[in-house]
Every structure is written in structure tokens, then in C-alpha cells.
Amino acid sequence: MEYSFGHLLQQEYGAGMKFEIPFLIQGGMGAGVSNWRLSQAVSRLGHLGVVAGTALDQLLSRRLQEGDTDGSIRRALEHFPFPKVAQRILDLYFIPGGRDPSTPPKPGRMHTVEHNIPAQELCMAANFVEIFLAREGHSGPVGINFLEKIQMPHLPSLYGAMLAGVAVIIVGAGIPLEFPAAIDALANHQPATYTVHISGPRAAEPVTMTLDPAHFFEAGQTRPPLPKPAFLPIISSATLATMLVRRVPDGLAGFVVEDPVAGGHNAPPRGQTQFTADGQPIYGPRDVVNLDIIRKIGLPFWLAGGYGSPEKVKEARDLGAAGVQVGTAFALCQESGLAPAFRHALISKALAGTARVFTDAKASPTGFPFKVGDIEGTLSDDALYRQRQRICNLGFLREAYRRPDGTIGYRCAAEPEAAWVAKGGGPAATTGRKCLCNALVANIGLPGLQPDGSPELALVTIGDDLAGVGRFCTNGHLDYTAADVVRILLG
């Protein structure tokens, strides 16, 4: 079929398009927890539904290999603007009726700094599909959440989401200075670049990735400008906010101000890190964001981390916030992508008063503290973690590093220790590191297989708000909906 960009232009968002971000933002929990079903449900209610942009290419390939039972992915791909790319993806990954569960899923291509067209195509299509489906059947805005720490997929992810009409780009886990320029370039289908952090000795010239949309257009296709999404960075300090305003003054729609009680990756404590008796990093007064400075900047801000109750919503209003971002309550609702067994286990613990969330300073290969929900049968059990054979076969949290000969290599602190050390990494850096890539994909019921044929185990991340999630349950029931969350939070 010949694709038209016309449907993208019927609903315009972002800078210069008179779009106002709603009061309530649903958190973008990855991988696949904040899926298109959850974000669509929230957007239909008049708020900002957000899909997680982490590992969408891997999730798309696995869902196609599982048979795409409801046909939603193939339906979305019919609208992808580059039909030949869509067909290549279907030929590679779609298995009618689903794959044999005894065989491992075929992995998508790992991202690299170098020009990697197959990886770019799959990533671009996956982000398009997720946003297309989240926007389907309603006129509300939809956002996407990226992690700055996962840099190599940035450009194809961003372009794919923009092709589908994403309204808001939210970025956390780092300092995303180059997103506004990339948004401007890709909105006009111009080449975009992004500087990649390279570990090891610095070179004279920075290393940049490039995405040129012209490579994907087919003969006769027109290229009308795309709607420019609003850009909303996640910050954990007023210093970062003022720096962003100074460096990209025209590129910001506001801020999400996140406290360290939020799920997922947290900013490390400022200053000398101290630990509790059980090994959790201690946050202190220096980690409290100075909202006086944020208010003086004059941009709208949304408060996140611990704002999943009516009382905290009122507090946010009193503090002058434009709204709140809520993750944990939505992560455990029925529309969430989190496997029902894990949702129910966490809710049951919360109702019984036995829920435990551990801030693990070592789990993430990124070096950022990572919130972990304590669930039996997952990698939160240290004995099960030690039994797992270390392997790096998805590679989203790999870091690029410079070899002694000046070339670029890739390594991950969660890969086998011998491989990490052979690539110049220190042995101590591997202690306690967990393969979040495989674990987070397992969280949503799409586990890969270990070399011995056993399924990869999950590692569920959740915020400290877990303790109060019972407020959304009726008569002790373990299932509630996104509409229940909105109704109880906002009355």
C-alpha cells in the first residue's frame, strides 16, 4: 500500500501547536509495562498516557514470533510509512501460530554506534507501532519515555515515535541535552545526530550517531513536516534544571521533578554515598529538589516519585506544580503489561503489609541505583541470581568503550566476568550486576531462554508507593483498572 502522512497532520501537538500537557501523567515504566494498552486507556480518560520506549524493538520481534495473536502489530505495520521495511520485519520475525517454546526467540539486532540499518529499521518500526496503537481510536495525547543512559537507539526510536504522532517526549536517567535538536531535524526529515558517551581515553573528536530519514523513503513518497512533540526531561535537582534552561532555552516544555522513592532507576545520592545496614543507599537533604528555584525558572513542572495518593496530589497542587506523574499505581493495574502473577503478588503483599522495595545500588549495569520489588521466584532472590548463567544477548545497557587501538567496542558489567575483564573492565564492577535487559522482558511474560534451556527469570521494579496501593483495590480484590487510579487520585 502507499502510505500517506496525512493522518499525522490532522492532530498537531508540541511547540507552536497550542498543546497543553494534562495534569496527570502516567509513568513510562519499561520494558513493556507501560504498553500501548495502558497508555491508550489513560489517554482516553483525558490524561497523558505514556508508553515505555525501552527495548521496543526486542518486544516487537518477540511478539511477532509469539504469533501476534490479536493481529495488532500487523495492523499497525500496515500504516508504517516504509512498506518495504515493514515487510522485511515480518519476513524475519513473524511466525503464524507462534514459535516452539522449546526454541529460543530470534533476537533483534544489537544497536551499535556505527551505521546499523537493520537495527535502525526494527527500532523505528517498533516505536511507530507502539505509538500508533496507543493513539488508535481516540484524540487524546500520547507520550513516550526514553532513558538517556540507553543512547544508541535514541534516533530511530525518536523518529519512529514522531512518525506515529507522539505528543510528548519524556527523558530520564541522564542529561538529555541533544533531544531538542534531534526533534527539530527529524520533524523535517533531515539527518539527525546524537553524541554517544564512550568510556576510556577521550578522542580528539566526539563520537556521534546519525540517522538520515532519506535512507528509508521510497520512490514517490512526499515528506510533509511532522508535528513536533513537546520535550519534558526528568530531573532530580534544581542544578540540572537551570543547566538545561541555559543550554536548550527554546527546547523545553517543562520538567518532571522526580524524588528517589520512584521505581526504576534513581539518581545516585549526592556527595559521599552512605548505606543502610542492608546495603541501600541513603538519600539526604542534598537530594531534595529546591522547588523555589524550579518555580523561579517559570516553566511548568510535574512532581513524581511518591505522588500516588490523593493527599500527595493535593500537596503537589499546593506547591505550584502543573501536575503529577504516577507510575506504581498504573504499573499494577489491569491494563499494565506486567505479568498478572507479578501484579497480584505485589498487591497481595501490599494488602498484607509485607511489601518490600529494595533500592539496589549494584543491580543495574548503568551504575544507577535501581528499585527492586521483593517477589519469590525472581532475581530479587540472591540465591536464584547466583544460579543464573551470565550472558549478554540483548545489549541495551552495554556501554561503548575505546579499545587501545582507538576502535570502539561494547561491554556490559552484567556479562560474564571474563568477557568484561578482557574488554578492560575492572572485576569489582561485575559484583552484584544483574542482566536487566533479559529480566525486564521476562517481567511482561516474554522471557528468553538461558543456555540450558530454562526461561530467564524476572526482576520487577516498583516504587515505594507500593505500600499504599491497596487504596485502589475494592474489598481486597487484586485487580483494578487505570480508571480506578484516576478516579481515586483526582476524585
Image (spheres, grey):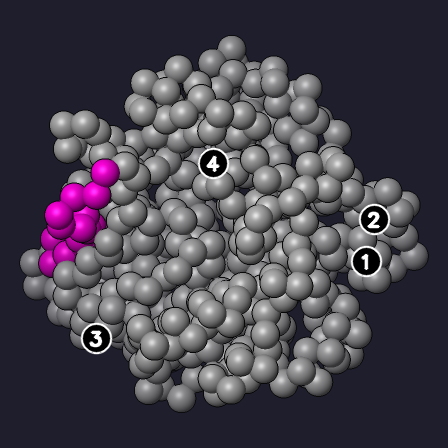
**Mark found first going from the N terminus, 2 or 1:** 2
Report the residue at 8% width, 63% height from top.
Answer: 220
Q: Residues within 10 Å of mark 4 (few under 14, many from 20)?
A: many
Quadrant where the C terminus sits is: bottom right
Span colored in magenta: 201-215
**Mark found first going from the N terminus, 2 or 3:** 3
> Hey, what amino acid is under mark 2?
Ala
Q: Position of residue 88 (x, y in %)?
A: 23, 40
Q: Is residue 7 above or below residue 334?
A: below
Name the residue that disc number 4 marks.
365
Q: Is residue 288 above or below residue 68?
A: below
Q: Position of residue 257 (x, y in %)?
A: 56, 69
Quadrant of res 26: bottom right
Q: Position of residue 371 (x, y in %)?
A: 63, 45
Q: Is residue 206 magenta?
A: yes
Name the residue that disc number 2 marks.
350
Q: Residue furthest left?
A: 219
Which residue occupies the foreground of this view, 14 or 136?
14
SS class, disc 2: helix
Which residue occupies the foreground of this view, 66 or 457?
457
Q: Position of residue 452 (x, y in %)?
A: 51, 11
Q: Is residue 318 left or right of residue 400?
A: right
Q: Is residue 331 magenta?
A: no
Q: Is disc 2 in contact with disc 1, using a CB cutoff of under 8 Å?
A: yes
How far apart in space, not on screen, are marks 1 and 4 (Cα)?
30 Å
